[in-house]
Image (spheres, helix red, strand yellow):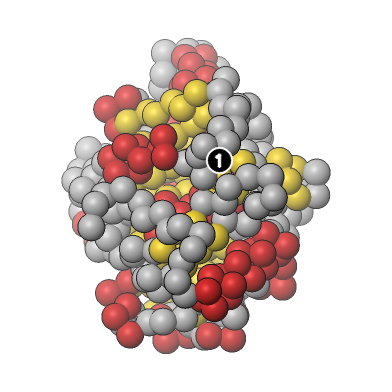
Amino acid sequence: MTKKSVLISTQYEDVTMLKRTMIVSLIFSLCSLSLTGEASSTLILNKSKTNTVAVNLDWKYREGAVIVHPRDSLMVSSIDNHVHHPLIWKSRYASVVFHAGNRFKPGLSANGMNEKGLVASAMLLKSTGYPPLNQELPTLNTSEWVQYVLDNYQTVQELVDDSANYQLLPSTYRGVTLSYHLVVNDAEGNSAVIEYLNGRLVVHSKDQLSHMAITNTEYDSAVMLLNDYKDFGGSKMLPGSNDSNSRFVRAAHYLNRLPSFIAKEEHIAYAFNGLSTVAQGPGTKTPTQLSIVFDAHDKTIYFRSINESAIRVIALADFNFDGLYQPRGLNPYQHLSGDVVKEFRSQYY
């Protein structure tokens, strides 16, 4: 098996499976819930340990699902196949993905982790400019970008190397275009921010990420803002509003003030503390519905929700991926605590 994503021809011999997968892909498209407004913040902690990735999911509605996806699932991108050649793939890796979607059903893939420890998080970026569509390349709906990445790659470098083999087409929901930049981290400690600006791919690799925080502003533009603020050579006080730039400055400030060494057992607490500094409260336009921490080294996910402060834990090692043949889901807003692996149900499909 090569490191390239597996592209299956439209003559795939299992016609029944293909039709079922196309229906699932259509459901993903129709149920998609846009993460409206300037939403979401990501912090990457890499003190004394492989990357710990902390994400706030901010949006208007308390909806969506956490889905564990099996290996060897045939997927078809939910685009108009009369106009574009849809990307078709078979998942190489199992994954746990946080989906937006109506009535706690899975819609667009927001972020998640696969069984190899790759973490991906899509964040709205209004200034995104994708290259002109090439009729020779297969096309992927941006609402499925995270799912595709987690299905096919083990490392950040694999993703970057394969980026020229498909193209992205943003979908629109409720008048909002789902144009993203993508934050990816792997179990080897590598990180990247992937953006499409002015029709070209821009990759900020780990050695180019001077500040391991990302919001909904182009990364280079956000970093330039820091020069105006205290701790970064400027004179301004920390901003207190919820706009993307303000959240970036506060996130960078928090990471800058972390101790040089953080014990392994304290990483998760520090990650949640960082998310609290950029969280949007109830009653705001896009409150923080979920705060999620991905431990790429231990392949464990921790999260809490707007309506339940108790932390829930998903250890990927506790799933029997060899015996998983259908997706299973969990309502992330259930009043649970601790290990929730046994709470996943097949009723979501």
Position above or below: 148 against 172 = below
Position above or below: 153 against 313 = above
Q: Nearer the viewer, residue 274 or 215?
A: 215
Q: Residue at x 67, y 59 (%)?
A: 29
Q: Nearer the viewer, residue 95 or 37?
A: 95
Q: Residue at x 59, y 32 (%)?
A: 133
Instruction: Point out the image quarter for the C terminus.
Output: bottom right
Q: Residue at x 68, y 45 (%)?
A: 83
Q: Amino acid at mark 1?
A: Leu
Question: Left or right: where does residue 147 sit relative to residue 256?
Answer: right
Q: Nearer the viewer, residue 288 or 159?
A: 159
Q: From the image, tell me which residue sits under label 1.
A: 168
Q: How many marks?
A: 1
Identify the element where label 1 is drawn.
Answer: strand
Q: Residue at x 25, y 63 (%)?
A: 298
Instruction: Place residue 70 in its image quadrant.
Output: bottom left
Residue 81 appearing in the image: yes
Question: Left or right: where does residue 134 sit relative to residue 126?
Answer: left
Residue 101 appearing in the image: no
Q: Hey, which residue is sitting farthest right in the picture?
A: 175
> Percent position (x, y) of residue 273?
44, 51
> Percent position (x, y) of residue 124?
61, 40
> Percent position (x, y) of residue 177?
71, 41
Position above or below: 88 against 20 = above
> Percent position (x, y) of residue 289?
62, 59
Q: Nearer the viewer, residue 237 or 267?
A: 267
Question: Left or right: where does residue 81 sit relative to residue 213?
Answer: right
Instruction: Point out the image quarter for the N terminus.
Output: bottom left
Question: Left or right: where does residue 231 sit relative to residue 31?
Answer: left
* Mark 1: few/some/many CA within 10 Å (<14, 14-19, 20+): many
